[in-house]
Image: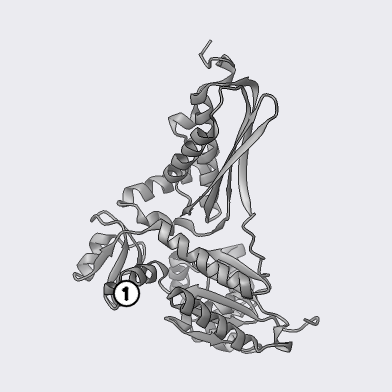
Amino acid sequence: MSAGSPRSIVHMDLDSFFVSVSCLEHPSLKGKPVLIGGTGDRGVVASCSYEARAFGVRSAMSVKLARRLCPDAIVVRGDYERYSYYSDMVTEIISESAPVYEKSSIDEFYLDLSGMDRFYGCYQWATGLRSRITRETGLPISFGMSPNKTVSKIATGEAKPNGQMQVEYGLEKHFLAPLTVDKIPMVGEKTSQLLHRMGVERIHTLQQMPPELLENVLGENGILIWKKANGIDNTPVEPYSERKSISSEETFEQDTIDVNYLRNQLVGMTEKLAYRLRSEKKLTSCITVKIRYSGFDTHTIQSRIPYTSCDHTLIARVKELFLKLYNRRLLVRLVGVRFSHLVGGGYQIHLFEDSGEMIQLYQAMDRIRHRFGDNSVQRAAGAGPDRHSLNPVNGLKT
């Protein structure tokens, strides 16, 4: 692609992904108001079908309220494993075809097709890929295409359900102008309400405002929102790599064979890494546990898991892997945990919990950690005993 040439960026988003997977595996659900989430009245809606949305049901709403709005709604408990399976299937199809792609969440992708117009029509090529995904997976998917990520994502939203749209270079502002301000990525409910109080309801109004005014009201985010409103976004498509990971290791001052101590160290590491995932709005689908013995002999064990960032899910799997890996009564020098195959995700996956209390607990703990540091809230197991008081051979307090 020559310097100064407009880019060709495609945003693909699986339509009501969790609902679509459930309908695919249970065809009797098709065309009905479906809620995905916790099955009890204290549960929270993680996703809902378009038929349910017609009654005013939305994600993050309590199941109790959703049932009141839509008495005929069918509540289906979320299935992590099946969503991960279908997400991986779509990822594989895209990876086989796209020159550069970014998996931004479990059900969203960005593709950079810049320069391909010399050989293919980019829009035609994307249309073919969309057809292939639906044909091979049975899942509906929509896409938007434009010179940048922001406009493409908004175009996808306008094309849904099960549609596609292209915004030609130079027409970005014209396309965005009549849309409501909440269509801009990063404009959440609070920012939208603030803008409404200022008399700003349509993107056209934002386009006419001085960026300095928005900066005064919204800080640095004000400038970013002004740029997005004007169709300006030079953010690159970050090539997706399943090698992307976060990890933590602990080398002990004294080698130990105390299994409880080792396990507690791994629990503490897992808690901190899970908090980091949630802070960065990421999910992991692969866990690796590492052990290095006193003779520097190092062993690892890895397991694929459904996408998650929940402490209790990750801790349980880390403990399980540790028990499989640690099968020799030898002194241990180091233990470590690594999460890989990361994608964007945030709290949506947490909404599969049976009750909103679990979600609120995570959010409260994370707020405390954000304010007072990673170590401010820990499970008793994760905090563990003081390593300096341990006998390195039998693990007894001295």
- Looking at the figure, which quarter contains the N terminus? bottom right
Q: Does residue 155 show up?
A: no
Q: Picture coordinates of residue 61 (x, y %)? A: 32, 62
> Three-letter amino acid code at disc 1?
Arg
Is residue 352 shown to the viewer in this render? Answer: yes
Dot 1 corresponds to which residue?
Answer: 53
Describe the element under mark 1 as helix, strand or loop.
helix
Could you say where residue 377 lies in the image, as x and y percent from the top left? 47, 36
Between 110 and 291, which is closer to the camera in this rendering?
Answer: 291
- Extreme residue in the right direction: 3
Between residues 339 and 178, which one lies in front from this camera angle? 339
Where is residue 79 shown, x and y percent of the image?
37, 58
Percent coordinates x, y for residue 91 in the rendering: 55, 67
Q: Splitting the image into 4 quarters, where does residue 289 fall?
A: top right
Point 43% across, 62% down: residue:
83
Residue at point 70% right, 83% down?
A: 116
